[in-house]
Every structure is written in structure tokens, then in C-alpha cells.
Amino acid sequence: MLTSRHNLAQLCAAVAAALPVLLVAPAAVAAPQVPPPSTAVGGERLGLPGVQVNPLAGAPALPRDLTGQSWIVSDAASGEVLAAYNPHLRLPPASTLKILFADTVLPKFDRNTVHRVADEEIQNIGPGSSLVGIKENLDYRVEDLWRGVFLSSGNDAVHVLSFMNGGIRRTVNEMQDRAEALQAWDTKVISPDGYDMDGQVSSAYDLSLFARAGLRNQDFRTYCATREAMFPGALDKNTGRRGSFGIANTDRLLGKYPGLIGVKNGTTTNAGSTFVGAAERNGRTLLVTVMHPASYQRVYDETAELLDWGFAAAGKVQPVGRLVEERQADGGEPTGQAGGTTGAPGTPGTPAPPPHAADTAARPTGGGGGLDPVGWPTVAVGAVVAAGAVVLVRRRRASRRRWGRFEC
């Protein structure tokens, strides 16, 4: 009896000691992650924390007071990274993930194809989503749907195109495959439209890879550069005729920043703001991605400042890394990796794809039909973790019901 009481006292002490750690564990697990330099795609310096830039004589200073948690400036043609700040930091991408969606699905359908939207294709869209205004049992051309994606960031348009592509799950799987082909190892796709989902992340580096690949498609370039368009409306019950209404691109730099091509903005209540912008000047095209600055407006201001710096610094800085090239379908070696010869992931000279925290689970240990003396405290600790997780989820859901959420 004394031994049992002693063991019970030890158990209680172990749980009590673990409790303060467990209460902060969810925040620690959810914290953004940066891969170690040895696994950083594009060059070792891109895996180092802080600002990475290698100025030569006469190079302009980087903009001051940048608030983005992560950003990168690169040359779209050569892939050279001119400067970066935590470019592999994994963060929620919001609607900038639609760049990968377009890069995956856009080549599959002729722009003049007509599709009649079924009711189930515009169901189960996340509350608060940005919508272009698609109605069931009406016909839409594919090019109209893509304008809805690029201009209005319409999650309804993404869902319809995903159903045309075989469904949401298939589209998500193909997007993940596409990301891996582009060596975008920081990206985990869960929703095709970028709607906030637990575990869905990308990085400034990966979003730049997606934009660079997308801009090689002329239709992609046309859609992301379109400022305004007319979108098919509903049928008039009295006349039987179908009207239309105007939509405008939500990209606040388009038409204002000289030479801006596009590409895509994204904002959610939970994720904050992210923007990928491409601009052309004197035959040079630069890509800038800014993730999660201090405010919605700052994402545009800081993108413009970094583009200005990039054009002024071109030829006056040495690259700190590269945007890698797409892996060959036959498994051949990719090109563009800074710092040495590259091959498929896992081969010498190429960093292996870093695992995502969401994909990694601890395996239980112990043998026989029961738990050893260490096992019981583990069960107790697990129970406390589960209880804490339930409380966090309930609080998060209550917060969403109270304040709502905005997705773009």
C-alpha cells in the first residue's frame, strides 16, 4: 500500500510539473518554422535568420522599417535572389495559394469551354469567403471563372474549377504534387482556395516559385494583369435575359505601381496579409513576396519599396541564393540550386524535403499488454494535453462566432 501511495504521489508530482509546459505547448507547436540552413532550398543563406543581402559598391540601402515577418526579392528570369528576410518561414498563405491553384489547373481547360454549375459545386465554401457571385444552374465560360479567381479572389470560382478538375480532394493532391515538382518544400496544401485551415502553410520563397512558374503561362499573365472585367450575372425572371456586372482586381498596386504585372494578394482575419507582386522595368522582371506585415496597407507599401530597391540594386548586389528550377518529370536533376550540384531530394548535394510538423507524429513505445511505470505519467500528461487542446479549440471557435472572419 505504501508503495502504491508513493507511486501515486510521484505520478501527481510529474503531472503537476508538466502542466505549465503543456499550457504553452500548443503555441509552441503552432509557431512558424524555419528549416535549418543545411536543408534550405535555394542556398544556405536563405535558411539563415534575419536579413540576407550582399551589397557591392554603390548599392542602395534596403528600405527601413520593414514589418513583414518574411520577404524576398528575386529576378524572375535568372532566379537570382537579391535580398531576403526569413524566406523559408512557414506561414498561412491566405489567397496567395491561388497562385499554385492556377499553376496547377489553368493549363487543363480551354478558356472558351462552357460549364454549367451544379448546386453542390458552390456548397461548403468557408464562411466569410470572398466570392465573385456564381449561381447554380447557369453556364459560365472558363475564362470568366478565372477572372473570378484572379480579380475577385472568388473562392466560389475556385470550387467550381476544382469540381471540373475532378473534385476538391483531387485538386488539393495535384496542387501538392505540383508544389513538390517545383521544389516548394515549405508548402502544405489543405484547401485549394487558401482559406484558413489548420496546418496549411507556405513561405515567401515558395510563393515566389509559384508566381515565377505561373508567369510563364500567357493566360496566367493576362488574368493577373486584368484590372476590370464584366462577369455574367443571373437570369432576369421577367425578361429571361442574362445580365452582367463589373468586377475589379483587388490588387491595390495594379495600375498604380509602374510596370506592375500582377500577381496575387491574400488577406484573412487569422493569417494577416500576404502579397506577391511582379513588375517589369527596362527589360527586367522582379518578383517580391511579403508575408504578414504589421497591417493590410503595409503589405502593398513594403512590396512597392522592395521593388524600387530591387530595380535600383540590380547589378550592384551579389545574389544570396536562387529560385530553383522545376524538377524534371523523368526524375532528372533540377537546375538553379545555389551552392552546388543538385539532384532529386535525398541524393547527395540536394537537401531532403523538410518534414512538416503536421505530418510528423510520435510513435508509442513499450511492450506487452500494459504500460510500464513511465507509461502511466505519459497517459496522464496526454490527458492534460487533450483537455488543453479542447479548451483552445472551443475558445477559437467562440472567437470566430463573435468576430467573424474575412477571407480574400
Image (tube, rainbow, N blue to C red):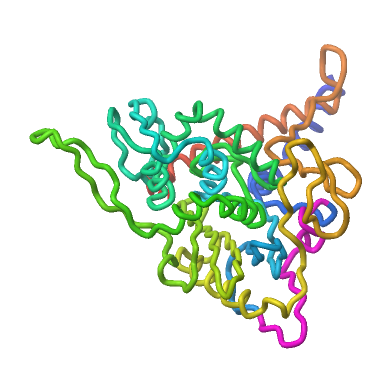
Indicate the quadrant where residue 401 lies. top left
Q: How many marks?
A: 0
Horizontal and vertical percent position of residue 212: 61, 55
Q: Residue at x 30, y 30 (%)?
A: 136
- Camera sees residue 8: no
Q: Furthest-bottom residue in view?
A: 58
Residue 242 higher or lower than 184, as above or below:
above
Residue 384 appears in view: yes
Which residue appears at 87% of the width and 13% of the height? 368
Q: Which residues are magenta?
A: 39-61
Between 299 and 313, the one lying in front of the other is 313
Is residue 407 part of the magenta span, yes or no?
Answer: no
Residue 191 or 242: which is nearer the viewer?
242
Residue in the image at 44% along x and 45% along y = 399
Q: Quadrant of the N terminus?
A: top right
Q: Quadrant of residue 72?
A: bottom right
Q: Position of residue 356 (x, y in %)?
A: 71, 41
Q: Position of residue 247 (x, y in %)?
A: 31, 53
Residue lying farthest to the left in this orientation: 238
For residue 311, above or below residue 131 = below
Residue farthest to the top, as pictured: 369
Q: Is residue 246 left or right of residue 179?
A: left
Q: Quadrant of residue 278?
A: bottom right
Which one is nearer the viewer's eye here, 92 or 347? 347
54 within the magenta span: yes
Residue 257, x across and y down, in percent: 46, 72
